[in-house]
Image: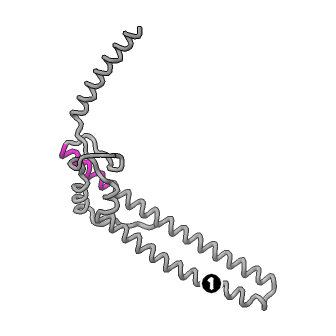
């Protein structure tokens, strides 16, 4: 019984090796550094500049709100001795309401900027995918893997630079659409 099982195992091993070596002979592999493309392409750098510009605009706007809140707080503490407890509580409630509204606005702006950035990067990923698919079809690659998932690969199978050249030629700018 054991001999039969062992013989079957050996035969199956040879069959599997034969099948896998046949499949490997037909597989043409390429590697691409997607993160490099998402960080260093012309379109990616443009998106990063747009994000930085919007952040700066938001910071200036928030600085104005912060200044107004400080003034309101100073007025509250300065005039507190001349007012009744009810007036102080009412004004403090209004002040706290302004603070909450400002925090909410800041969060909304941050979220909208983050969503716009993600949308732009998704658009860029789509363009990268199209270019990779074209190169794979042209060169007969049957498998294209992300460099982040590969431990070691020959430089000759890395198509990142080819993709970068085509990407920079075809996509110069992706608009940052903030809602």
Q: Is residue 156 within the magenta segment?
A: no
Residue 107: horizontal and vertical position, in percent? 55, 68
Q: Could you tell me how many numbered marks the image carries?
A: 1
The stretch in magenta equals: 126-139
Above or below for 96 versus 10: below
The reply, left or right, for residue 9 in relation to residue 26 is right
Q: Secondary structure at mark 1?
A: helix
Residue 47: horizontal and vertical position, in percent? 36, 67
Single out the residue that lies furthest toward the top. Answer: 1
Quadrant housing residue 176: bottom left
Quickly name the residue at label 1: 70
Residue occupying the point 67% across, 84% down: 73
Quadrant housing residue 174: bottom left
Q: Magenta part mainly helix, strand or loop?
A: helix
Residue occupying the point 59% across, 69% down: 104
Query: Could you tell me which quadrant the N terminus lies in?
Result: top left
Residue 140: horizontal and vertical position, in percent? 20, 42
The reply, left or right, for residue 58 in relation to residue 164 is right
The reply, left or right, for residue 64 in relation to residue 7 is right
Q: Residues within 10 Å of mark 1 (few under 14, many from 20)?
A: few
For the rendered model, the colour scheme is one colour
Residue occupying the point 73% across, 90% down: 79
Residue occupying the point 76% across, 88% down: 80
Residue 95: horizontal and vertical position, in percent? 68, 79
Q: Is residue 132 within the magenta segment?
A: yes
Single out the residue that lies furthest toward the left. Answer: 138
Front residue of 119/25: it is: 25
Above or below for 32 versus 63: above
Above or below for 138 versus 43: above
Above or below for 32 versus 169: above
């Amino acid at each position: 019984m054991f001999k039969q099982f062992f013989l079957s195992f050996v035969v199956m091993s040879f069959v599997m090796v034969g099948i896998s070596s046949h499949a490997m002979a037909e597989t043409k592999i390429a590697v691409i550094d997607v993160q490099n493309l998402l960080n260093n392409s012309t379109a990616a750098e443009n998106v990063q500049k747009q994000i930085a510009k919007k952040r700066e605009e938001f910071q200036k706007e928030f600085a104005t709100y912060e200044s107004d809140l400080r003034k309101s707080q100073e007025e509250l503490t300065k005039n507190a001795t001349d007012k009744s407890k009810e007036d102080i509580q009412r004004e403090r409630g209004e002040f706290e309401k302004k603070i909450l509204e400002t925090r909410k606005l800041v969060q909304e702006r941050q979220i909208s900027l983050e969503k716009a950035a993600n949308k732009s990067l998704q658009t860029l990923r789509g363009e990268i995918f199209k270019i990779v698919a074209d190169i794979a079809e042209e060169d007969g690659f049957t498998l294209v893997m992300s460099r982040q998932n590969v431990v070691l690969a020959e430089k000759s199978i890395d198509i990142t630079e080819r993709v970068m050249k085509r990407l920079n030629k075809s996509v110069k700018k992706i608009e940052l659409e903030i809602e």
